[in-house]
Image (spheres, rainbow, N blue to C red):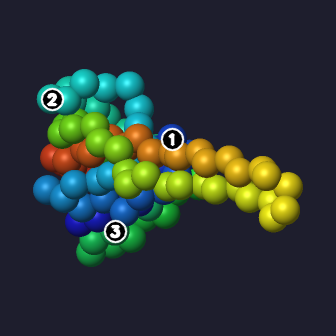
Amino acid sequence: MYAVVEINGKQYHAEMGKNLIVDRFNANPGDSVVFEKVVLLGGEKIQVGTPYVAGASIKATVKEEMKDDKVVVFKYMPKKGYRRTHGHRQPYTVVTVNEIVGA
């Protein structure tokens, strides 16, 4: 069984026992969280929500918080002496899907 779940405005494909890398949200490692915005449930019979499947949810455990690789932004204007360097590391939360509750 699998599900498409909306977390922080983005949709993710969730399967039992798999890890999801989602945009960071406020939770500590070891916390259990429930995501109720399930857009689609798949398996023997596919259920599509309008916009969400009623009574469906995803139960997960927060595994860790991590940061992605650094992205370097470099601005440069030739012959003007203008150089700017800026870096960014996107924070993520890793959750493990424990259970997919269907309708």
Can you give x and y, in whole percent of width and height, for residue 36 in the image? Answer: 41, 39
Query: In the picture, residue 90 is in which quadrant?
Result: top left
Of the image marks 2 and 3, the number of the one nearer the N terminus:
2
Label number found at residue 8: 1
Examine the rendered structure and indicate whether residue 12 appears above or below residue 86: below
- Amino acid bearing label 2: Gly
The residue at 41%/32% (across/down) is 25
Can you give x and y, in whole percent of width and height, for residue 100 in the image? Answer: 24, 51
| Side of 36 where 31 appears, left or right | left
Q: Quadrant of the N terminus?
A: bottom left
Can the viewer see residue 30 in this picture? yes
Can you give x and y, in whole percent of width and height, for residue 58 in the image? Answer: 30, 45
- Name the residue carrying label 3: 42
Residue nearer the viewer, 61 or 28 = 28
Q: Secondary structure at mark 2?
A: loop
- Amino acid bearing label 1: Asn
Q: Secondary structure at mark 3?
A: strand
Residue nearer the viewer, 95 or 98 = 95
- Name the residue carrying label 2: 30
- Amino acid bearing label 3: Gly
Badge 2 crowding class, 10 Å Cα cut-off, few under 14, some 14 to 19, many 20 or more, is: few
What is the residue that sits farthest to the bottom in this orientation?
Answer: 44
Q: Which of pointers 2 and 3 indicates the residue nearer the eye?
A: 2
Badge 1 crowding class, 10 Å Cα cut-off, few under 14, some 14 to 19, many 20 or more, is: few
Q: Are marks 1 and 3 in contact (CB under 8 Å)?
A: no
Q: Are marks 2 and 3 in contact (CB under 8 Å)?
A: no
